[in-house]
Amino acid sequence: MKKSKFKYNYETLAFEPVKRNFKAVLKNAMSFIFSTTFIVILVAYFLFHYIRSPKEIMLERELENMEFNYNVLTDRMANLEAVLVDLQERDDNIYRVILEADPIPSTVREGVYGGVERYANLANYTNSQLIINTTKRLDKIASQVYVQSKSFDEVFKLAAQKEDMLISIPGILPTNKGYLVSFYGMRPHPRYKVMKLHAGVDFSAPTGTPIYATGNGIITDAKYLPGYGNTIIVDHGFNYKSLYGHLLEMNVRVGQTVKRGQQIGKIGNTGNSVGPHLHYEVHYKGIPKNPVNFFAFDLSPQEYHEILQRSQTVGQSWD
C-alpha cells in the first residue's frame, strides 16, 4: 500500500494529506536532476584536478625523466661547445702561429649545417621548436668538429714539415762581412731624392764579398733586373722567397737547388746602386717583409736588439 504524505495545517490545527500534482512532481524531479548533475560535475572536477590516474602518474614520471635527460644533454652540449671553442682558439693562436699558417676563417668554422627543409620533418609537434633548435645546435657542433678535424690534419702535416721549414725559410745573414747601412721602410731614395719604400736592407761591403743563401731553396731567377742589376731570387718554399741585388757575380743557375749558407754570388755595384753593396729582400706570399726579423738565427740576442734599434732610424737607402 502506497504511503500518503501529510502536512500540518496551522489554521485548522490538523494534519491534512498532501495533494500531488504534475507541476510539483516536475519541479521536484528537475531539482533532483540539477542537484545530482552539479554534484557529479563537482566530483568529476575534483577527480580530474586532484586525483591522478595511474596512466597520468606514469606519463608525468616519463615527462620528468625526459626533462632531466634534456637538461643533462644541454649541459653536455655546452661543455662540448666550450671545449671546441678552446680547441679553435689554440689552433688559430698557437699551433698555426708556430707553424706560420693562416687561421681558419670564421665563415669556414661556422660552416653550413642545413637549411629550412632539413628540419621540416620535425615541425608540427607540440615541442617542435625545442626539437628543431636542439637539432640545429647538434648539427652546428658536428660541422665545427669536422672543420677542426680537417684543420688538425693540416697542422699535423705542417708539423711533420716543420724541420724542413726551419732550414728552408730565410734565417741567417746573407753576408758575414758586410755592414748594415740602410733598413726596411720609407727611406729617401739616393737618386730620386723622394721618400720611397725600401723593400729590403742594404749591406755595405767591398766588391767581391761572398753572398750566401739564407735558407734551403731553388734558384728561380739569376739575371739582370732593371734597378736591381744582377739579381738572384731563391724560392724557399712555404711561401717564402729571398732576393739578392746589385751583384758582381752570380754563381748559380736557374733551377739549381741550394743549401743555407751556400755561396751564390758576390757583392757588386750593378743596377741602380750608389756604391758596392748587397740589397737583400725577404718576401712572404709575394709581400716584402722586414728582413731584420729573419736574422735572429744568426745573431746573439744583444746583436739582434742593437740591429732592431738601428732599424728605427731613418737613413738614405743605397738604391
Image: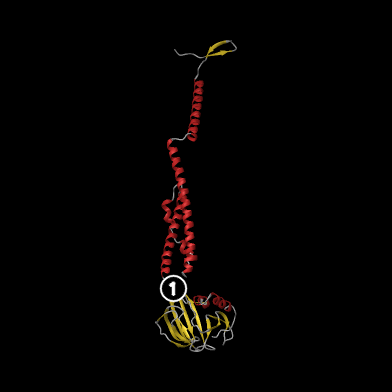
- Callout 1: helix, strand or loop? helix
The 10 Å Cα crowd at callout 1, few under 14, some 14 to 19, many 20 or more, is many
Q: Quadrant of the C terminus?
A: bottom right
Q: As displayed, is residue 276 above or below residue 136? A: below
Q: How are the residues colored?
A: secondary structure
Q: Nearer the viewer, residue 187 or 37?
A: 187
Q: Nearer the viewer, residue 140 or 99?
A: 99
Q: How many marks?
A: 1
Q: Residue at x 48, y 83 (%)?
A: 244
Q: Position of residue 276 (x, y in %)?
A: 52, 88
Q: Which residue does the numbered mark 1 point to in the structure image?
A: 165
Q: Nearer the viewer, residue 204 or 5?
A: 204
Q: Position of residue 295 (x, y in %)?
A: 51, 77
* Residue type for callout 1: Met
Q: Quadrant of the N terminus?
A: top left
Q: Is residue 15 something one can see in this rendering?
A: yes
- Give the quarter of the image for residue 117: bottom left
Q: As displayed, is residue 220 above or below residue 16? A: below
Q: Is residue 102 something one can see in this rendering?
A: no
Q: Nearer the viewer, residue 263 or 152?
A: 263
Q: Position of residue 26 (x, y in %)?
A: 49, 23
Q: As displayed, is residue 271 above or below residue 83? A: below
Q: Residue at x 43, y 68 (%)?
A: 159
Q: Residue at x 42, y 51 (%)?
A: 122
Q: Position of residue 34 (x, y in %)?
A: 50, 27
